[in-house]
Image (tube, rainbow, N blue to C red):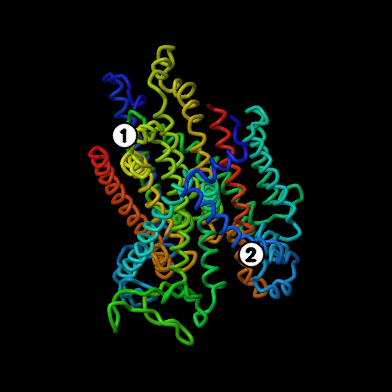
Amino acid sequence: MTKPPPLRDWLRRNLFSDALSSATTVALVAAALWWLPGLVDWLLLQAVFRADAGACQAASHAGACWGVVAEKYRIILFGRYPHEEQWRPLLATALLLVVIVASGRRLLPLRMMTMAWAVAMPAFFILMGGGRFGLQPVGSDQWGGFPLTLLLATLGMLLAFPLAILVALGRFSSLPLLRGLCRGYVELVRGVPLISVLFLASFLFPLLLPPGISIDVLLRVLLGIVLFAAAYLSETIRGGLLAIPAGQHDAAAALGLGRWQAMRWIILPQALRAVVPSMMNSAVSIFKDTSLVTVVSLYELTGSLSLALAGDPEWRSFHLEGYLFIALIYWIGCHAMSRFSRGFEHAAR
Amino acid sequence: MPIAVAPAPTPAARWRNIGLQALIAGLLLALLWWLIDATATNMRERGIRSGFDFLLEPAGFGIGESLLPFDSTDSVLWALAAGLANTLRVALPAILISTLFGTLVGLGRLSPNLLLRKLCGAYVEALRNVPLLLQLLAWYFIVTDLLPAASEALQLAPHVFLSKSGLSLPWLGGDGGLLNLPQRGAMNISGGAAMTPEYLALLLGLSFYTAAYVAETVRAGIAAVPRGQSEAALALGLTRLQNFRLVLLPQALRGIIPPLTNQHLSLTKNASLAVAIGYPELVSVANTTLNQTGRAAECIALIMAVYLILSLLTAWLSAWLERRSGRWADRS
């Protein structure tokens, strides 16, 4: 008996297992032959890559106008940040990205990593804000583009995390009032859209502070994002806490650990490790949700694209290419995060 | 709940607990009083009035499109009601489309056909990893800028026209018979039911974005049914369709329905992004009201209250569905 050649075997198993599957294969291949040439034409062959508005207009949407990215990338990536100072957001972003990636891949031991964060965050603010080491001061109202997106997502997640742990622990407290408060907060925030929380941060927070004290709109919006993200994160962490078997509590108690000691050294580390993938999902959501701050006039990546194109009659008809460009940036960020969480799941098994 | 299981409190511990809670309540009240006092002072200094009396005053602004009859002399309250009606007008069809389409994509991800599996996987990966706001803006741009003008509208099917001014569909009723058919004129399209570009962009954006999440929910729900169930059903001589309908689906539904209602709820919350493309739903109308009257606290409280009520209703509906689907599964 001869074995069927592996290719034929593979084709039969994956593409032609039965009549329905064969029909699907034929239909999909036909559709691809029909659509793909046009798509490749538009994306590459007939596309205009030079920053030349005239050539783009001449192509009249038969090919993509990637020239819009070549022409406007500095406004799209850095918003209204002063042109000659843009090496600063570039450096700050690169620094933060390096620390994030190093943490994700666990290139350094925990203590070094904590120190790297403790250096990177202030360095980011000094580079962006200036006013020190001879750097020209740049107000946070001029920050924009990708650095702002990255800052809101990173700091939002970093600050929401401890708050979320406290709220999750609060829901297991022996004090009914504290349990109720934590539950109320989580249910309230999860019930309303992020936009209403951002409105709250942007319009109402200034009124809540005593007269004479005002905080920057960037900080207010960041606070809104933190409060919003913490509610979702705390639900994830609560799930992790619930999943720890009772034997762990008993064992900790038998070793003479108190309730809080057991929580700190036995329960919480296991619970947090178990929910890393869900927490990465939250991180992906926060990263995407930072795009909403456009609505309260902070020009992060999405906002700065409108800033770059909306007022420019020469280029404004090539918004789609601009959208695709920043969609790619978001996609890479989100995809990297989910890859990380999948890798973590495999390693945990 | 293993963690909540604490040893029975001794009398001393009970008194300590009561003391702690009194302390928390006291701190909370002090904080609240301080915030309210600061707010009141601020509002006095800036001459901002407060209260909900503005709800009954005439709105003074128009609403682009509305399911409820509305003009600018109607009250603010009625404007907000029209906004809520508009939210539901886009959310309900989007829920339907995203559920149907998402289910198809989710089933496609489990197909024995490799191409279909990869295609559906690519769809989910592409749509989930790009912010919804960006997708909405892109859809809105495609509809309003890249489609042909109304005079050269694309005809998708007999009497279905797509153009810069939106989508026109045949609809029930009208002057001359059972169906009211859109007709292409020299300048515009008349008759039938017309969807504005804003509505169309929002509907498409919400539906396709949420469908990616629905697909994942459906896939995970079906994949969670142990493989032995299908093998047993096929061994008993059930066809693949029977196996799906009688064995897989009833068991999968229990795992699918709770996250699915969550998806529907977040779709309704995401409809608030309409504020960015100018479709007048609840948040958009409340935002206009806020800018006109300056009653920020009241407007934000109203938005939150409405969404909280929607959430509670959905939670209640979801619990009811879960009980029902449980019964259905037990019966079959």
Please name the residue that numbered disc 2 is placed on: A38
> Mark 2: which secondary structure?
helix
| Residue B35 seen from this side | yes
User: Of discs 1 and 2, which sits in the foreground?
Assistant: 2
In the depicted structure, whether residue B246 falls above or below residue B198: above
Residue A116 x/y as whole percent:
67, 35
Amino acid, disc 1: Ala
**Quadrant location of residue B286?**
bottom left
Which residue is at the far bottom? B186
Amino acid, disc 2: Gly
In the depicted structure, whether residue A290 falls above or below residue B69: above
Subunit of mark 1? B
Q: How many marks?
A: 2
Please name the residue that numbered disc 1 is placed on: B22
**Quadrant location of residue A77?**
bottom right
Q: Is residue B64 left or right of residue B310?
A: right
Subunit of mark 2? A
